[in-house]
Image: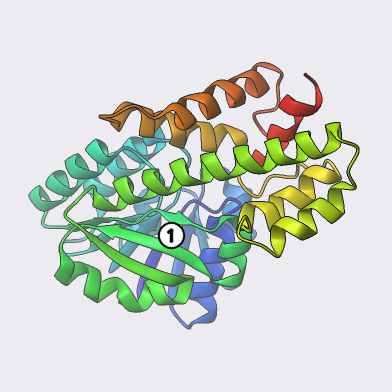
Amino acid sequence: MKKIAWIGTGVMGKPMALHLCNADYSVAVYNRTFEKAKALEPKAVAHQNIKDCIKNADLIMSIVGYPSDVKEVYSEIFKYAKKNAILVDLTTSSPTLAKDLYEEAKKHHLSMLDAPVTGGDLGAINQTLSIMVGGDEEVFQQVLPIFQVLGKTITYMGKAGSGQHAKLANQIAIAGTILGVAEAISYAKAQGLNLASMLDVIDGGSASSWQAKVNGRKMLIKDYKPGFFIKHFMKDLKLAAEEQHVNHPILEKTISIYQKLIDQGLEDQGTQAIIEYYFNQ
């Protein structure tokens, strides 16, 4: 699979596509904003439409924003992908949609994997992403060398849709963690503690987490530059809420807090901006 078509060259997609270029794969790229795809040249070849981008590809990979974007992209891919190509959607999307795309791909003599990632922009840049994959295991094995260029922890989760379910479980865990970090900072501030020292304590003990080490520090200096947009995290949390079959109070509380931030116009800030909810109460 030396010829790869890559769709989506945003915060995550751009560095991921470039890693494949640097690994000597032939990569064609498409983004609905052509200038974002063009920025990857000369390492990749940018195209102005999906048809031209994918027509010669053995492997087609996508990482876009929302389930509606996934539907739109794959309606084009199914028209123009060559027979026996492998399709991999890295977007965090609906498990139900992932299953539907898997079945539709089979009708077109194509193979389909759902393979959402976690690790944020730093994980994409540093090739340390975790990738959870749903679909046929034999297809997963074929794509595994590609995944290993992009990430550090690659896990086959099971049948179609399983990758998406694993990612949504991951997002629920992040929701609880980032909420806990923000509340810890809010509590410490109210008690007059040195917040940087308090985070040093957390980082060195059993409460340590990536959210505390990275986003906690950003909260202290009000650095809300998005490694992961609030609007995209909210999309993930709502997808999880739609799929849930038991009570999830942390998930529901986190959704309500982020909705308040979106109502304030902060949807394009990073998820660490949740601290604004606590600082402005």
Is disc 1 placed on a helix, strand or loop?
strand
Question: Where 142 falls versus 67 (above or below)?
Answer: below
**Image color mode:** rainbow
Q: Quadrant of residue 278?
A: top right
Query: Can you see residue 250?
Result: yes
Residue 253 appears left or right of 247: right
Q: Is residue 269 visible?
A: no
Q: Is residue 39 left or right of residue 164?
A: right
Q: Residue at x 43, y 59 (%)?
A: 6
x and y, in percent, of residue 8 in the image? 49, 51
On the image, which quarter does residue 137 sit in?
A: bottom left
Nearer to me, 82 or 126: 126
Quarter that holds the C terminus: top right
Residue type, numbered disc 1:
Trp
Q: Position of residue 215 (x, y in %)?
A: 70, 49
- Tell which of 162 and 192 is nearer to you: 192
Q: Quadrant of the N terminus?
A: bottom left
Q: Is residue 155 above or below residue 142?
A: above
Q: Which residue is mark 1?
A: 6
Q: Nearer the viewer, residue 88 or 79?
A: 88
Query: At 54% across and 29% down in the image, what residue appears?
Result: 254
Residue 231: x and y in percent read 57, 32
Given the current orientation, which residue lies at the most extreme bottom position?
Answer: 24
Q: Is 161 left, or right, of 281 in this rendering?
A: left
Q: How many marks?
A: 1
Name the residue: 57% across, 48% down. Answer: 34
